Each structure stands twice: as structure tokens, then as C-alpha cells.
Image (cartoon, grey):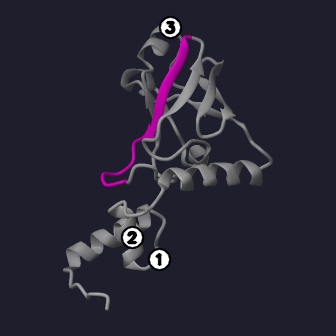
Amino acid sequence: MTPVIRIDDEVMDELKKRAVNLSLVFEPPNTTLRRVLDLDVDMKAIADKIVQDTLTKFGKKDVIELELYDSSRKYVYIPLPKDKRHFFPGYKLNFELVADIGVLTAHVTGAPNGTPIGDPHLGGHIRGRFGPWYAKHPELKGGTKLRIEALEPGKRYKLSIVSKGV
């Protein structure tokens, strides 16, 4: 028999909030708890499948363009809008960016505390060792457009500069 647990309103509210963040609104509380606790969920496999399904669904869109913010150079990141999030592997899962200075290891970050590693939906920044890349390109500022091409979706991408900022 499955045990019954009692939780207070504050815990239930937090569980609901996490269900929304994890896109599990219509799932039972147990499913949300399993995701929060990282129980028997292969998030990398889920993220890889979502990337592949999305690429197939949209006619193998293997190139996206992103735009830098004024703060991108200062905080050494690349902004990632929600509508482009599907292009990359799950939260905090490493991938390679092939740039003009060499191969940079990067990952998606910028999600709420408690986001499980591998979550394919959350994260609003790409972080990595971008310091040398920004140093080589003093022209990079807010409004600069970047092109990222999927060489091996979920694993390896090519990063190039399309236009200078305004």
C-alpha cells in the first residue's frame, strides 16, 4: 500500500510552483516530486529527444540567430530567448561551441534555484569560457547578432558573428 503524507500549505504552494517551472502542471504531485528529487529520470535522454523532435518538426532548423545584450560582455554570457531554448541540450549539460578562437565548452544556465540538471525547458543564458572570445572581439556589444549552427545537435555547435551591434 502506498503511504499517505500530509504537507502544509507552504510546501504545497512550492510544489505547485515547481510543477509550473517543470511544465508538469497536469501531472500528479508524485511526478513533480520525482523530477525535483531526480529519481529515475534520464533528463539528458529527454533533452536529446526534444532537440531531435524539434529539429525534425521544423524541417531540420539547424541554424539560429541570437542577439547580445549590453550586459553580455560585462557578465560574459550569451542571452538565450525562450523561443530558442529548444535548440540546446538540457540545463547545465555541457556542449561545445566551435568559435574562431577554438572550441569552447558551454552550457545553458540562468534558471530558478532547484531546476534539475538536464531540464530541457529552463535556462535563459549560455555560459562558458567566453572571456577570451569577448577579448578577441571588442566590437561585440548590445545588438550584435550571432549565428549558431548545430553541427551535432545537443553536442557540438558553430558560433559566428553575423553583424556588429548598434
Residues under labels 2 and 3: Cα distance?
A: 44 Å
Say which residue appears at 31% left-offset and 55% top-offset.
114
Q: Secondary structure at mark 1?
A: loop
Give x and y (percent) for residue 70: 45, 26
- Magenta stretch in the rendered image: 101-115
Label at residue 115: none
Residue type, numbered disc 1:
Glu
Dot 2 and dot 3 residues touching (CB under 8 Å): no
Q: Earlier in the sequence, mark 2 or mark 1?
A: 1
Front in this rendered view, residue 86 or 153: 153
Q: Is residue 143 magenta?
A: no
Q: Which residue is mark 3?
A: 136
Give above or below for 97 relative to 42: above
Front in this rendered view, residue 113 or 94: 94
Give x and y (percent) for residue 125: 46, 37
Say which residue appears at 26% left-offset and 88% top-offset.
4
Quadrant in the rendering for residue 77: top left
Give x and y (percent) for residue 135: 45, 9
Q: Is residue 166 visible?
A: no
Which of the image's four quarters has the N terminus? bottom left
Q: Which residue is mark 1?
A: 27
Dot 2 and dot 1 residues touching (CB under 8 Å): yes
Q: Is residue 111 magenta?
A: yes
Q: Which residue is mark 2?
A: 32
Q: Nearer the viewer, mark 2 or mark 3?
A: 2
Residues under labels 3 and 1: Cα distance?
A: 48 Å
